[in-house]
Structure formats: C-alpha cells, structure tokens
Image: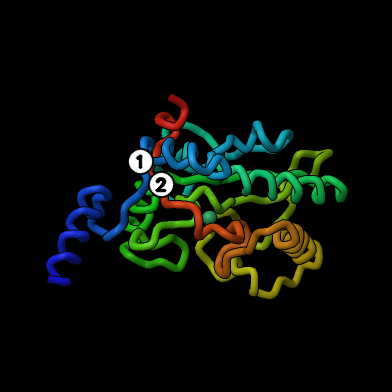
Amino acid sequence: MQAKLLLGLTVLSCAAQAQNKYGLHATSLAEYQVSIKSDPEKELVALDKSVPEIVLDIRYATTNNFTGAKVYNLPRAYARKAVAEALKKAQSDFNTLGYGIKIYDAYRPYSATITFYELMKGDTTYVASPYKGSRHNRGCALDMTIIDLKTKQDLKMPSDYDAMQKESWPSTPVSDPIVRKNRDTLISIMEKNGFKVYSTEWWHFDFVGFEKYEVMDIDFKQLEK
Ligand SMILES: [Zn+2]
C-alpha cells in the first residue's frame, strides 16, 4: 500500500518536473517567472545595469574561450538580485583601491554546462558536473577579474582566464609579489562581501547561500523576451 502510494507520488512529481539524462530538472522560463512572483529576490538582473561602471567581456558569446566556439546567443551578464547587491558592495571596496570589476561570465544556461562537460569527456576539474549543475546555472557564480580604473587594463594575475593549469589554483604559490597581491586583493574583497573563491580557479566566485536558487536552463534571448 505504502509502496504503491510512493510510486504514485514519484510518477506525479516526474510528470510535473521531467528529468534529463543526468537526472536533473532545470528550471524553464515559465517556471522561473512563477518563482520570481513568489520570491522577487530570485530575479535575474543585468549586472551592467545594477552595478554601474562594470566592464563586460563575455567570452562564451565569442570564439575566444576554451571551446573555440560561440556558446551564448547574446553577450550578457545576469545574476540573482542578491548576488548583484553583494557585487555592488565589493565594487565600492575595489573602487577605493583604484580598481574596477571585469566580468567574464555570470549566469550560464544549464545547456552550456552540458556542452562543457561533454567536451571535457567527463573531467570535472575545471567544468561542472551536469548531474548537479553549476552555480553559474543558479545565477550565483561570477567569473571575473579586476582592472585599473585609470588605464582600464587588467591587473596581472597568475594565469589567463579559463587556463586549465595549476597556476589557476588560488592555493598555488606565486613568486611575483605584484601578481600575488593582485590575486589576493581580488579574493579577499570578494570573500569579505559574501562570495567564496573556487579551489581550482582564481577568477570564479560562488555566492554564499546559492543552494536556495534553482538550476535554470533559459537562454539569453528567452530572458529578454
Ligand atoms: Zn566559473
């Protein structure tokens, strides 16, 4: 009797939320629109509008990324409202040092996470597992660096963005004191403002509290409709 009831419930919930081949259900545009009605904090906001002066260099909307192909249909940086608010506070800390923020990637549709995982043939050292989804898919992760506000040039970091090598790890020692200071400044200001750096990427920051936000599969053109 109980088994039958459980089976019935499982069938019901599968019908409501179909899972993909990785056993995950990513939120659609319609589901997202319902979710922000009950919780406006979940809204995805455009970072260049909510964090003025921010510089965007959205690599996945170009061919200048590790896949060599254009993955996004528009060069956009979206994040949940609470993430944008925390980033704004970090920006004011960077500004007092004469630095600004450059964003390489923010919200990433779940379908891009599948593309990256399949390209990497299942190696998850530098890309997320589609069984869980990425924090980027939740609108709760930022790939970024800092620039000099006067020259607009990137501050020198231990590796290029998306370089899949040990130099990208925040725990790897850096001999050049200026590069070390740049990396440590980026990480310490972001962590002071509610983010956590990723263990293999100095440029990737997860918003603390990402768990309450769902994995979404909505592309940028859909979002702007
Ligand atoms: Zn990232």
Residue 90 image offset from top left, x and y in percent: 75, 50
- Crowdedness of circle 2 by 10 Å Cα count: few (<14), some, many (20+)? many
Which amino acid, by three-letter code, is at mark 1? Ser
Which residue of the protein is positioned furthest toward the top in this rendering?
225
Q: Are marks 2 and 1 in contact (CB under 8 Å)?
A: yes
Q: At 69% from the left edge and 50% from the top edge, which residue is drawn? A: 86
Q: Residue 49, located in which quarter of the rendered image?
A: top right
Residue 10 image offset from top left, x and y in percent: 21, 60
Q: At 52% from the left edge and 48% from the top edge, which residue is drawn? A: 139
Q: Is mark 2 within 8 Å of ligand 1?
A: no
Residue 115 visible? yes
Pick the quarter of the image with the C terminus: top left
Answer above or below: position of 32 versus 115.
above
Q: Report the residue marked by disc 1.
A: 28
Q: How is the image coloured?
A: rainbow
**Front-most of 170 and 140?**
140
Pick the quarter of the image with the N terminus: bottom left
| Count of picture labels | 2
Position of 17 with respect to 186 (left or right) is left
Residue 4 image offset from top left, x and y in percent: 12, 67
Which amino acid, by three-letter code, is at mark 2? Met
**Front-most of 123 and 93?**
93
**Front-most of 149 and 6?**
6
Residue 18 image offset from top left, x and y in percent: 24, 50
Q: Earlier in the sequence, mark 2 or mark 1?
A: 1
Disc ID at residue 216: 2
Disc ID at residue 50: none
Residue 179 visible? no
Q: Report how far apart the C-alphas of labels 2 and 1 lie in the structure.
A: 6 Å
- Crowdedness of circle 1 by 10 Å Cα count: few (<14), some, many (20+)? some
